[in-house]
Amino acid sequence: MGGRAAGKEAPTGDTAPVELLAVSTGVAIAYGIGLWVVLIIGPATVTVLKGQWPLFDYGWFTLGIVWWIAGFRLARPESWWACHLYGPAKLARAEARYPETLAEEEGIDGEPDPPWVRVATALFLALCAVAAILAVGGLLGL
């Protein structure tokens, strides 16, 4: 009998790949959350760590496409990314590219954004990351 239950046949034709992916609703949700984290939260977090705050703001309007662009750009010299991950040569390139400081940048209304805006944005990102981790952990039974 080959180890198959009576009456059950191997999937054939167009349904074979679908049946392999459609394991359960929980797994589909876990895949969805994983894709969301990889495609949206990851690039947004890299954008924030690189100090690209204007591009982070614009990313909300472009559904995250700008975050992918910012992820490949050189970090600002005062950002966490540059301070922790750049060597002297790359830090010198960043300082040459961004001679102005982040505090001198102007917001939409012509004045710098208040500090609470950046704190609120960072907290929102952290909350999204924690929610995704808890959701995946709950789905996997951890």
Image: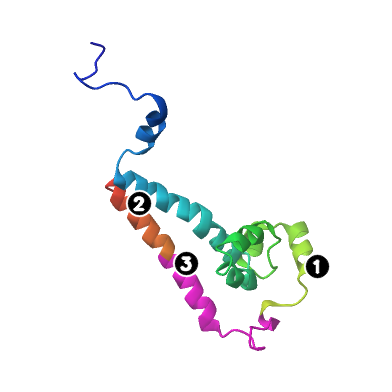
Residue 136, labelled with which disc?
Answer: 2
Residue 136 falls inside the magenta stretch: no
Res 10 → quadrant: top left
Which of 103 and 7 lies nearest the eye of the viewer? 7
As helix, strand or loop, the secondary structure at mark 3 comes to helix
Q: Which residues are magenta?
A: 103-127
The answer to whether 70 is drawn above or below residue 19 in the figure is below
Tell me the residue at 38%/55% (across/down): 133
Label 2 – label 1 distance at C-alpha: 42 Å
Mark before the other along the chain sequence, 2 or 3? 3
Secondary structure, magenta segment, majority class: helix
Q: Residue at x 50, y 59 (%)?
A: 41
Q: Residues within 10 Å of mark 2 (few under 14, many from 20)?
A: many
Q: Position of residue 26 (x, y in %)?
A: 30, 47
The residue indicated by pointer 3 is 125
Residue in the image at 45% along x and 72% along y: 123
